[in-house]
Amino acid sequence: MATDVQIVIDSADPHGLADWWAEALGWQVEAQDEAFIRGLVESGAASEADTTTHRGALVWRVGAALNSPDPGRPRVLFQRVPEGKTVKNRVHLDLHVGDERREAEVARLVGMGATELYRESQGPFTWATLADPEGNEFCVA
């Protein structure tokens, strides 16, 4: 039996960062069921403090997730944490766009608020390392 994988990224603003990555990847932010959330709050199983409003919708405060339009890719969850990022990531995302699209993709992502950190190559492979708006490193190869 195969094991499902979810990628989790710590964040100060999970909903804002999920929006940013959805645009960066061309994925969709996973819808949250307002009626379900309201029902849990009304029944006492959750509190108003567990919720927030994002883009006019009631959502869980602790996180937001992305889903790929292509089945079989892992879900990406952005979860709220109290501390900011202070050191290099131990795990990061690689966005494979190909040599012919790399420069345009780096420019697009920087235009969206990413920061270019450095360029590297090893043998025939070349990539740019960037940071998302919260400082999480990722590569564009």
Image (tube, rainbow, N blue to C red):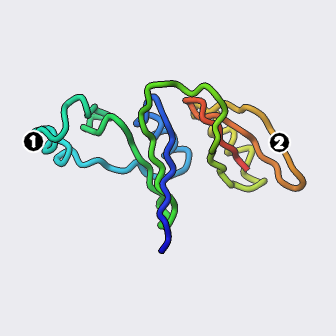
Q: Do the CB atoms of the residues marked 1 and 2 lie less than 8 Å apart? A: no
N-terminal of the pair, mark 1 or mark 2, is 1
Relative to 117, say whether 34 is above or below: below
Q: Which residue is mark 2?
A: 120
Q: Name the one closer to the observer, 105 or 50.
A: 50
Number of numbered labels in the structure image: 2
The amino acid beneath tag 1 is: Ser
Left or right of residue 63, residue 140 in this image: right
Relative to 63, say whether 5 is above or below: below
Left or right of residue 94, residue 70 in this image: left
Residue 39: quarter of image = top left
Residue at (64% x, 28% y) in the render:
87
For the residues marked 1 and 2, what is the alpha-carbon distance in whole angstroms? 54 Å
Residue at (82% x, 42% y) in the render:
120
Residue 111, can we see it? no
Residue 78: quarter of image = top left
Residue at (43% x, 51% y) in the render:
28
The disc placed on residue 32 is: none
Q: Which residue is mark 1?
A: 43
Identity of the residue furthest to the bottom in this view: 1
Q: Residues within 10 Å of mark 1 (few under 14, many from 20)?
A: few
Percent across and percent down for residue 106 are 69, 41
The amino acid beneath tag 2 is: Glu
Percent across and percent down for residue 125 are 83, 53
Q: Secondary structure at mark 2?
A: strand
Relative to 77, say whether 70 is above or below: below
Q: Secondary structure at mark 1?
A: helix
Residue 83, can we see it? yes
